[in-house]
Image (cartoon, rainbow, N blue to C red):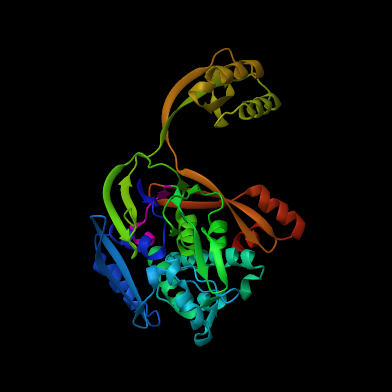
Amino acid sequence: MKVIYLDCSMGAAGDMLMAALYELLEDKQAFLDMMRSLGLPGIEISAEPAVKCGITGTHMKVLVHGSEELDSFHEHLHGCEHDHAREPDHAHTHAGEHEHHQHTGLHEIEHLLSHLDLPQTVRDDALAVYHRIAEAESKVHGRPVDQIHFHEVGTLDALADVVGVCLLMHLLAPEKVYASSVHVGCGQVKCAHGILPVPAPATALLLSGVPIYGGAIQGELCTPTGAALLTHFVTKFGELPAMRLLKSGYGMGTKDFPAANCVRAMLGEQDAPTEEILELSCNLDDCTGEAIGFAMERLLDAGALDVYWTSVGMKKNRPGILLTCMCRPLDREKMVELLFRHTTTLGVRESAFRRYTLSRESKTIQTPDGDIRVKVSTGYGVTREKPEFEDLAKIARKTGKSFSELQKSI
């Protein structure tokens, strides 16, 4: 199973994540050609070697109308003219530019993305990242999402970062993405209307539920774009998981700190998760259907992984039932006791098996009719999604809609 681990010990910004993932590619030129062929207005992208604290990596240079943004992310919001710069001492230099540039809202971002020649999954990921940012800013500033606007130059720069990271994740196709706890920096950051604490309010909202920490390094190490990308793609935050390391990449920021200012991406392989399970079975020819049904309920309530019956032919040509219970080894005694207690069997057979499973998670989809939980299973190069039956049934009863109608709304 292919996995990626992101070391965010110096925070995360869009260009740094893009550069770190770029270094993991086999065909780097193909990615740059794809990005350049998108026709992002006024954008030029190049990958340049960079060295921080003796470590060589890549700086992803994004030019907007011939100029490079300071440390990759200046997201100016029309609501508060907020500049989420990673170099707060430079933030004031852009405050006066707001009167000279148009502002772009989420609708315009959606329109622009819809016209880029991108795989649908990449477009969907990019839209989801932007919605995360806009929703966080909406809560911070007390304005509806459709009233949140981005400064034109900052939008183009951030858009290149977001699209680049989403495209790289598509090309690398990891089955799991892990990340360390996120170093957010400390101190304060300047914006046009005042001074804000680090992490900035929108970044803090985006990182809700994520392990973060500060330190002695002054400045904003994790940007809103970095936070939105991490929370969209990362499966789990924490320590480096066990894996066979295949390749490492370093995405460099522009500013110098006592520690190497970079995001490190590590590409590796993990063994497919396996576990030992037991199959307990017994033949029944003198047990009623009601009793068998009740026994199955008791076994499932006690933690059985699965319980099922099969029609079989028994000695003297008697029709019978083969009752099978799948369970974990630790539950063996409990399941055997229940089989004897709730059926007429005189003996239980045991077989040991090793099973391979897809990793399973749950997410909630918001629809006009209500929230629907969706089970997501991934692994072995496949991804499957299945809406929760009870949620669909509840909404179907309430609205009179069919299952197929509701599934189309997901």
Number of marks in the rendered image: 0
Residue 77 point in image, percent of width and height: 55, 74
Task: Look at the image and tell me whether residue 241 can be seen.
Answer: yes
Query: What residue appears at the point 59 percent right and 28 percent down from the top-left corner?
Result: 303
Tell me: residue 181, above or below residue 201.
above
Q: Which quadrant of the figure contains the N terminus?
A: top left
Q: Which residues are magenta?
A: 169-180
Q: Is residue 86 left or right of residue 268?
A: right
Query: What residue appears at the point 48 percent right and 22 percent down from the top-left corner?
Result: 329
Q: Which quadrant of the figure contains the C terminus?
A: bottom right
The verdict on residue 299 being magenta is no
Quarter of the figure with residue 256: bottom left
Q: Is residue 128 left or right of residue 299?
A: left
Residue 255 point in image, percent of width and height: 34, 64
Front in this rendered view, residue 52 or 123: 52
Quarter of the figure with residue 262: bottom left
Query: What residue appears at the point 52 percent right and 46 percent down from the top-left corner?
Result: 361
Tell me: residue 26, above or below residue 332.
below
Front in this rendered view, residue 244 or 240: 240
